[in-house]
Image (cartoon, rainbow, N blue to C red):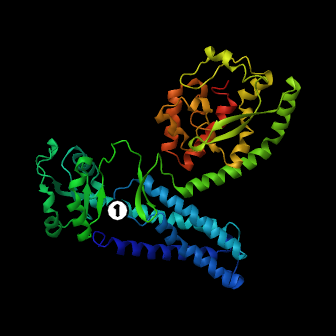
Amino acid sequence: MLRNYGTATSSLLMIFDVVVSAVICILLLQWPAASGLSDPFAQGGTAMMVVALTGTLIWPVTFQHFEVYSSARTQGFWDVARRLLVSGLVTATIFGAVAFASDVPLNRGFPFLCAAIQGLALSGMRFVLYGVLRTARRFGRNTRNVLIVGSGPRAAQVKRNIDAHPSWGLRVLGFVDDVDTPLDPSLFAAKLFRIDQMPELLGDLIVDRVIVACPRSMLGSIAPVLRSCSGAGVPLTLLPDLFGDFLPMPHIGRFGSRPSLEFAAVHHNAVLLGIKRLIDIVGASIGLVAAAPILVVAAIAIKLEDGGPVFFRQTRCGLYGRRFSMLKLRTMCVDAEARKAELFDLNEMDGPVFKVKLDPRITKVGAFLRRYSLDELPQLWNVLVGTMSLVGPRPPVQEEVTHYEISERRRLSMRPGITCIWQVSGRNEIGFEEWVKLDLQYIDSWSLALDARILLQTIPAVLLARGAH
């Protein structure tokens, strides 16, 4: 059943999700310590019914939206966990909003408690199910049959990937290619078929999926494969090297009425980026209030030292190179920018970045502020207005960006931040090349958990003045 009726299996999972979430929601509503009510449906009336139905039916909706019901056969643990976590966060938010809008006399924390328990139950059930299925596949059960189009190095690599993951339960029936195409040495003993045999193959064999793993020079000759798969209703996975092997992950979109294949440096989940922005707003607001006394004292000290302006504004490059005015507490003498040319020979950083450890332009107050990164506090305002984030690659100045290599410009593909991996990894003690490498590592592996870890690591880095000058 699981092999041939994936849609029916998803429907059964949806029904199971509704039943489990309904049972949990009703039990918690009947528990006064959780709901705050002795008879919730009598005390809440119709509005309580709406809330209960929301807490029950919203799970299949969010699971469907975030593709939790799609096959997890070739996906890793963290891919599945991430989708479940995002679904849970969205569900809890919607559940809480409905409970608040309906003004039911529930404990305010009930929707989040209920969603958390439901999410744990539904996630636990899935991981048990996935574990059972993966174990069964290792013993030859619940398998899928695949045909691989191509017989060169890319096709051989796909075969090695399948062989290395027996828990995927994929069985390679053979390889389909042009007669005169060079054969990868590792496939000499494999079953080979011609492209013009595709209609017969799909008719005679049980084929669950066709995987196209051919060089781009062969794309013009696989039209019969596409027609045959479309006509037979067999799913097709396309893995050709359209523009080389170093192209970013594609994303399906639309350009007007036509489907399109979108390529971007990264494809971050829009919901998670929205949560990141919400955290930025809340964090910056709290930070500005908490930092207000420090800013007042610092402003007085700066004024008393030389009478110059308190804040230093500098044009920096933000998301995709957009320019914005970044705020800092002034730590240098008033004519610091005019004197910068005199110090070029003292630059201690490689690449286009300018840093001088014992910069003579730094004031006494500025040295203290820099030592503990207090001069960065006004950037919380930049975070609040949206030109920066709490965590992200540090924003460069325009003259640095003009000297970037094309690959280095990718560090501008995410909103710049106050702190980043570079900030907690030694700051000025590491070179520019390593700095860029760390920023790209952050962009490629970004998650809310990574942001939280960097923020936590920033505290000791600042207190110990690691790499600061």
**Residue 436, visible in the rendered structure:** yes
Q: Residue at x 57, y 53 (%)?
A: 273
Image: 379 above or below 429: below
Q: Residue at x 59, y 18 (%)?
A: 348
Quarter-of-image position of residue 235: bottom left
Q: Nearer the viewer, residue 271 or 78?
A: 271
Q: Residues within 10 Å of mark 1 (few under 14, many from 20)?
A: few
**Identity, as a three-letter code, of the amino acid under mark 1:** Val
Q: Secondary structure at mark 1?
A: helix
Image: 456 above or below 45: above
Q: Percent x, y for residue 118? A: 54, 68
Image: 132 above or below 42: above
**Residue 215, visible in the rendered structure:** no
Q: Percent x, y for residue 434? A: 50, 29
Q: Going by the image, does 179 lie left or right of 114? A: left
Quarter-of-image position of residue 454: top right
Quarter-of-image position of residue 196: bottom left
Q: Quadrant of the C terminus?
A: top right
Q: Nearer the viewer, residue 214 or 448?
A: 214
Q: Percent x, y for residue 401? A: 56, 32
Q: Nearer the viewer, residue 104 or 98?
A: 98
Name the residue tied to disc 1. 132
Q: Nearer the viewer, residue 115 or 70?
A: 70
Q: Percent x, y for residue 374? A: 74, 33
Q: Residue at x 61, y 23 (%)?
A: 354
Q: Going by the image, does 99 lie left or right of 21? A: right
Q: Quadrant of the N terminus?
A: bottom left
How many circles with numbers are drawn on the protein? 1
